Image (cartoon, rainbow, N blue to C red):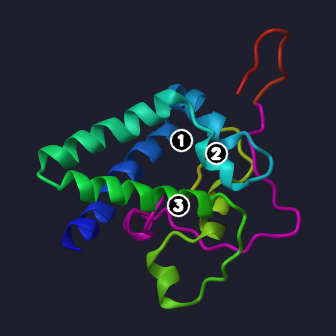
């Protein structure tokens, strides 16, 4: 139980940093934008990622966890649970916040707000995947209501050219 709690805090902290960099660095955004392109979020949107995004996120953290002595079985089980969380957070499921769990866990509506229609140049929020802890610590947590005209996706910063898509 202690290992699972530590994994949640450490993994989410590492992923928070990587995810925030993916939004702040134009070079990294070109890869990460693939994840933000769907104009409607569904569970499978969680797996719409560029391989480079996965490489810079999951490989270093997994190596670090194993070098730190975490049990490989616990790490594997942890990844299974986190994958279910990712599916739910992208499934456009509305679980109303307002209870003590919503203060700890990154609810689907918080992550949906993270996917607000954007070009990659404007600031965004709710970078954490599991807990709200790191967003709260670094001031990037938002619990804004989502209006009827709420849109997700990536707005291109210029017109597309034949043979080359611009993000």
Mark 3 nearby-residue class (10 Å; few <14, some 14–19, many ≥20):
few
Q: Where's the C terminus, which quadrant?
A: top right
Sequence-earlier tag: 3 or 2: 3
Q: Position of residue 121 (x, y in %)?
A: 63, 39
The quadrant in which residue 80 appears is: bottom left
Q: Residue furthest right?
A: 149
Q: Position of residue 162 (x, y in %)?
A: 85, 10
Rounded to the nearest whole Å, what is the CA distance between mark 1 and mark 3?
24 Å
Q: Secondary structure at mark 1?
A: helix
Q: Secondary structure at mark 2?
A: loop
Q: Position of residue 83 (x, y in %)?
A: 49, 55
The quadrant in which residue 18 appears is: top left
What residue is shown at x 28% (from left), y 43% (from top)?
62
Residue 55 appears anywhere in the view: yes
Viewer-nearest residue: 164 or 46 = 46
**Compared to 35, does 55 lie above or below?**
above
Magenta region includes residue 145: yes
What residue is shown at x 62% (from left), y 67% (from top)?
108
Residue position for label 1: 23
Which residues are the magenta region? 127-156
Residue position for label 3: 84
Rounded to the nearest whole Å, what is the CA distance between mark 2 and mark 1?
9 Å
């Amino acid at each position: 139980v202690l290992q699972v709690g530590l994994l949640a805090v450490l993994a989410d902290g590492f992923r928070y940093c990587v995810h925030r960099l993916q939004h702040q660095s134009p070079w990294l955004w070109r890869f990460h934008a693939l994840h933000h392109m769907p104009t409607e979020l569904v569970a499978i949107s969680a797996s719409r990622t560029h391989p480079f995004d996965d490489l810079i996120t999951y490989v270093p953290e997994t190596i670090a966890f194993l070098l730190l002595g975490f049990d490989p079985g616990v790490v594997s089980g942890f990844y299974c649970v986190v994958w279910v969380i990712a599916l739910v957070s992208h499934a456009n499921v509305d679980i109303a916040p307002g209870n003590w769990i919503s203060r700890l866990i990154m609810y689907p509506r918080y992550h949906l707000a993270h996917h607000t229609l954007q070009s990659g140049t404007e600031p965004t929020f709710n970078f954490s995947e599991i807990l709200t802890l790191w967003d709260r610590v670094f001031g990037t947590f938002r619990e804004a209501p989502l209006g009827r005209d709420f849109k997700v996706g990536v707005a291109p910063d210029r017109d597309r050219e034949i043979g080359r898509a611009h993000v």
